Amino acid sequence: MLNDQELLRYSRQILLQHVDIDGQLRLKESRVLIVGLGGLGSPAALYLAAAGVGQLHLADFDTVDLTNLQRQIVHDTDSVGLSKVDSAIRRLSAINPEIQLIAHRAALDEDSLAAAVAAVDLVLDCSDNFSTREAVNAACVAARKPLVSGAAIRLEGQLSVFDPRRPESPCYHCLYGHGSEAELTCSEAGVVGPLVGLVGSLQALEALKLLVEFGEPLVGRLLLIDALGTRFRELRVKRDPGCSVCGSSHA
């Protein structure tokens, strides 16, 4: 049940007919893994903590650097040199002491990633490299856990939801294949802070929709964001029957 403090804390959210008391209870009982506590993971973690997701599992092996602070808003100047997980826990605990925060400070290998994904209801991929995204996708397909995937670089962002519980849903590999060897990171190409804030916030929104079960998640759709022109475009994405990760021969 929700106590009096929780009813007051989440009152504006509970007022929504799509959430109500039952939806808030679902959030309280939910467990979410956030992979990466950088530009995307920061706003996602802040909003999911504030919304009352009962358990947030936080995964990042990096430490806070001064160059992170332009966009990674869960961290502050006093966090420089600290583990990103510990920095995030300090901030999230201050925002909402009602929730549980589970730390994953070491890099996740195949076994530990599989265990981390199996322990939650939903995964947010907020990482910044293709190999991690591929590994997270494979673990989510294997465990049949929905994945909210976001990316941003320079002045462009992308967002989609992959839900292996739905037979029509593609997976990350259906869309991107084996990626590109010429992949750039924000440290090489740059990125504007509000863009990652936007993508990370949308990831949190998609997560809430999936957990409470309202609205239409971005399953089978890829949202493209052009920050330079403030334009949003949507592409339809179909499942690849021959996909080496989620195809019929691997189901």
Image (cartoon, helix red, strand yellow):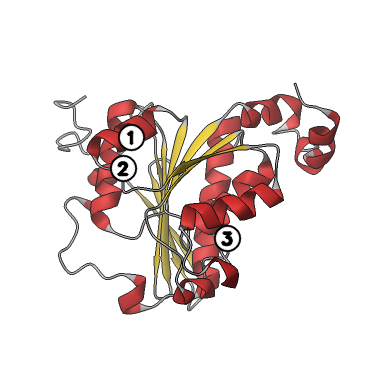
Q: Which residue position holds label 3?
A: 74
Dividing the picture into quadrants, the one containing residue 120 is: top left
228 vs 94, nearest the viewer? 94
Quarter of the C terminus within the rendering: top left
Q: Which residue is drawn at 56% across and 64% down?
A: 75
Image spot of residue 90 (x, y percent): 61, 53
Work out whether 203 lies above or below 142. Answer: below
Q: Badges 2 and 1: C-beta atoms under 8 Å apart?
A: yes
**Which amino acid type is marked by label 2?**
Val
Amino acid on which the number 1 mark rests in the picture: Cys
Q: Which mark is residue 140?
A: 1
Q: How crowded is mark 2: few (under 14 residues within 10 Å), some or many (20 or more)?
A: many
Whole-Å distance between the Cαs marked 3 and 1?
25 Å
State the image coordinates of residue 155 (x, y, percent, origin top left).
43, 75
* Helix, strand or loop status at disc 1: helix
For residue 136, which numbered disc appears in the image? 2
